[in-house]
Image (cartoon, helix red, strand yellow):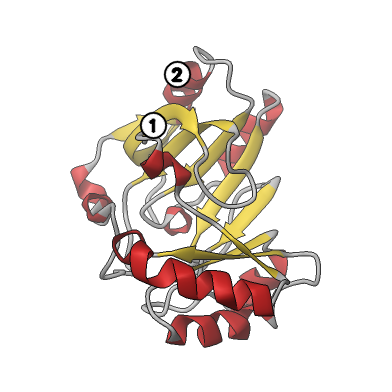
Amino acid sequence: MVQIKNTDTITLPVMEHFYSIQGEGYHQGRAAYFIRLGGCDVGCVWCDVKDSWDASKHPLLNIDELILNIEKTPAKLVIITGGEPLMHNLDELTVQLQSKGYETNIETSGAHPLSGSWDWICLSPKKFKAPLPEILPAANELKVVVFNKSDLEWAEKFAALVSPNCKLYLQPEWDKASLVTPMIIEYIKQNPQWELSLQVHKYIHVR
């Protein structure tokens, strides 16, 4: 866990932060301010942000500085992602964001204990390091990245463990999208409790 408090300043390792469009999942198409935290011990072989894995490579930014940057934009929604953001204690960050009226969302593998106060939790479990059982019922959205056919059966394992109101998404792994997307579409037609999530931001060339 990396969270350094010096008197009234808390810092977190930030790989990047920017204002853009949410490209996937339930909130697809919404304007959002993204904070991508450094540090991840899940190690997905197909990860498209491997530079985020080593937290020590990224500058420590204090929460006040982050919020000042968010306030320069018209953002209403702030999404905390990674890396694996729950490697860090996010209580103070979310308290300050919500005190200023921001909606707080997190994208997590669920492999670390839940911290922070969230309006929406997107759980994206990974085979490389399973989510903690206590996070499953808290998820508002289950988003499973599909790399091969066996991932569909694996997705159903977690769909049975989240709450009945949790939104269910299958998302093709980007580099294999041309191969697995038709398979996902057919699966969803047979299992309509699932929906398709596409990484639209990559199609429209925004980060």
**Relative to residue 75, is residue 45 depicted above or below?**
below
Instruction: Examine the rendered structure and indicate whether residue 86 appears above or below residue 150.
Output: above
Q: Is residue 121 above or below residue 8?
A: below
Across and down, in percent, residue 195 comes to 64, 63
Q: Identify the residue shown where x is 32% and y is 66%.
A: 176
Q: Are marks 1 and 2 in contact (CB under 8 Å)?
A: yes
Q: Residue furthest top?
A: 72
Number of numbered labels in the structure image: 2
Q: Is residue 118 above or below residue 94?
A: below
Give me the residue at 41% from left, 71% from top. Answer: 180
Q: Which mark is residue 1?
A: none
Instruction: Please state which amino acid type lies under the numbered disc 1.
Output: His
Looking at the rendered image, the quarter that the C terminus falls into is top left
Within 10 angstroms of label 1, few (less than 14), some, or many (20 or more) residues? some
Q: Position of residue 50 (x, y in %)?
A: 24, 56
1 or 2: tag closer to the N-terminus = 1
Between residues 42 and 158, which one lies in front from this camera angle? 158
Mark 1 element type: strand
Q: Quadrant of residue 142?
A: bottom right
Q: Nearer the viewer, residue 205 or 69?
A: 205
Which kind of residue does numbered mark 2 sit on?
A: Asn
Location of mark 2 (residue): 69
**Residue 154 appears left or right of 148:** right
Q: Which residue is mark 1?
A: 17
